[in-house]
Image: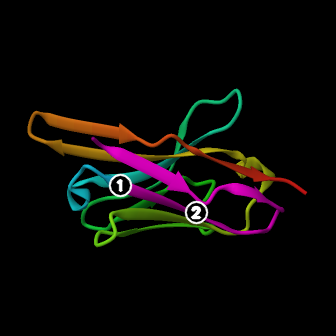
Amino acid sequence: QVQLVESGGGLVQPGGSLRLSCAASGITFSFYDMSWYRQAPGKQRELVASIIVRGTTNYADSVKGRFTISRDNAKNTVYLQMNSLKPGDTAVYYCNAYYSMSSMRRDYWGQGTQVTVSS
């Protein structure tokens, strides 16, 4: 059974920091590209950051320079360090694991963790 369990969300003041974690089980973690998405009320889910198997990272323009994605294959965990948080970062943050090889596709999601940036 595949599980992606996010943690680390909460309420933080503007300018503050949070570190999200996503612990994976039931998959060969090192084979998967890992991403963080977010969805704010009334908006579509959007990609925040991704880190592929080889370690290359990609960020949404809105978070470049403020957020950092990393992974620890020994711990089957991906992280999202979020600094200089803004009210516009308020959303439910989801972890995603994606695998693609030839005709095989696997796509898994966590349950989400709420991040609220407010004074």
The local crowd at label 1, few if under 14, some if 14 to 19, many if 20 or more residues have their Cα within 10 Å, is many
Quadrant of residue 45 within the rendered picture: top right
The image shows residue 11 at horizontal and vertical percentages of 77, 56
What residue occupies the far right of the structure in this picture? 119
**Dot 2: element:** loop
Kind of residue at badge 2: Lys
The quarter of the rendered structure image containing the C terminus is bottom right
**What separation in Å lies between label 2 and label 1 (alpha carbons)?**
25 Å
The local crowd at label 2, few if under 14, some if 14 to 19, many if 20 or more residues have their Cα within 10 Å, is few
Residue 21: say if magenta: yes
Q: Which of 117 and 54 is in front in this view?
A: 117
Quadrant of residue 23 within the rendered picture: bottom left
The residue that mark 2 highlights is 64
What residue occupies the far top of the structure in this picture? 42
Tell which tag, 2 or 1, sits nearer the viewer.
1
The residue that mark 1 highlights is 24
The image shows residue 79 at horizontal and vertical percentages of 48, 65
The residue range painted magenta reads: 1-24
Q: In this view, does 95 lie above or below 51?
A: above
Left or right of residue 90: residue 58: left
What residue occupies the far front of the structure in this picture? 1
Identify the mark nearer the N-term, 2 or 1. Answer: 1
Q: In this view, does 48 lie above or below 17?
A: above
Q: Which of 46 and 72 is in front in this view?
A: 72
* Main secondary structure type of the part rendered in magenta: strand
What is the count of numbered marks?
Answer: 2
The image shows residue 83 at horizontal and vertical percentages of 67, 69
Left or right of residue 15: residue 103: left
Residue 72: say if magenta: no
